[in-house]
Image (cartoon, rainbow, N blue to C red):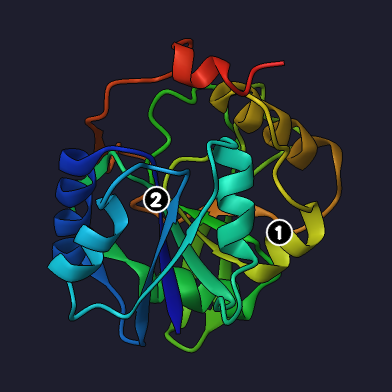
């Protein structure tokens, strides 16, 4: 089983575009569950989505404007959360098919923690190591991100990725009460500074795979609620 966590706050148009694209392009042979991690959007935001897509196996968590870290931490700790999680923010619209079967097979057959599906565009300076693994799908080739020799901070990124529970069990919860950028930056530093499960991409994982459609809230009043 695999749970898709949609991380959201008050993007009613964007989240529907994101969800429709995921429904079209996610390729997974197992059981898919869906979880909404909402940071306190007022009104009928979450109930409306649940009513609109009743065919999906939904669960949901809500935080009260506590920021990205607290929102995702609560979702990851939701009772019954699966070992495999595909994490995607509410404004990343996938443009191509995503083979989650291959990513899941790698996570089950290696000690990797994350398979990035976002495409590495924009993260110039990452070093990659070509690897192979025997999996339930046969021998798979993948590229592991080299933490020691990469000059770019974001070996880890909040951008769309498939993860195993061992990843957050090892590296711990996200920092809370920080702005969005500081949350990601702090966690990315933790990945570089601490030994633990690695991060990889599939051979198709270098070109950009998502259209980032949302208007950024970084540096706005909403983001500054969590800045310190």
Residue 1 higher or lower than 63, as above or below: below
Q: Residues within 10 Å of mark 2 (few under 14, many from 20)?
A: many
At 30% from the left edge and 57% from the top edge, which residue is drawn?
Answer: 46
SS assignment at label 1: helix
136 horizontally vs 133: left or right? left
Residue situated in front as seen by the camera: 132 or 2: 2
Q: Can you say which quadrant of the picture contains the N terminus?
A: bottom left
Which residue was labeled with disc 2? Answer: 88
Which residue was labeled with disc 1? Answer: 168
Residue 32 higher or lower than 178, as above or below: below
Label 1 with label 2: CB-CB less than 8 Å: no
Query: Outermost residue toward the right?
Result: 194
**Percent position (x, y) of residue 142?**
50, 59
Q: Residues within 10 Å of mark 1 (few under 14, many from 20)?
A: some
Label total for image: 2
At 57% from the left edge and 82% from the top edge, which residue is drawn?
Answer: 80
**Percent position (x, y) of residue 135?**
53, 83
At 49% from the left edge and 78% from the top edge, which residue is drawn?
Answer: 105
72 horizontally vs 24: left or right? right
99 horizontally vs 169: left or right? left
Q: Earlier in the sequence, mark 1 or mark 2?
A: 2
Residue 128 higher or lower than 88, as above or below: above
Image quadrant assignment for residue 91: top left
Residue situated in front as seen by the camera: 156 or 44: 44
């Amino acid at each position: 089983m695999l749970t898709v966590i949609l991380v959201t706050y008050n993007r009613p148009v964007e989240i529907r575009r994101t969800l429709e694209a995921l429904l079209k392009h996610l390729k997974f042979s197992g059981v898919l569950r869906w979880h909404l991690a909402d940071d306190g959007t007022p009104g009928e935001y979450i109930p409306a989505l649940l009513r609109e897509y009743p065919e999906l196996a939904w669960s949901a968590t809500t935080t009260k404007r506590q920021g990205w870290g607290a929102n995702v931490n609560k979702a990851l700790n939701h009772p019954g959360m699966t070992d495999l999680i595909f994490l995607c923010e509410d404004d990343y619209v996938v443009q191509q098919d995503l083979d989650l079967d291959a990513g899941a097979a790698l996570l089950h057959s290696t000690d990797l923690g994350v398979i990035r599906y976002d495409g590495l565009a924009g993260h110039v300076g990452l070093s990659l190591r070509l690897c192979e693994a025997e999996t339930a799908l046969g021998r798979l080739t993948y590229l592991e991100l080299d933490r020691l020799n990469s000059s770019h901070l974001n070996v880890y990124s909040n951008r769309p990725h498939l993860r195993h529970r061992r990843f957050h069990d090892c590296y711990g919860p996200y920092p809370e009460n920080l702005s969005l950028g500081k949350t990601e930056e702090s966690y990315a530093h933790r990945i570089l500074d601490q030994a633990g499960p690695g991060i990889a991409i599939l051979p198709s994982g270098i070109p950009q795979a998502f259209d980032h459609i949302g208007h950024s809230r970084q540096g706005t009043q909403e983001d500054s609620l969590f800045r310190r």
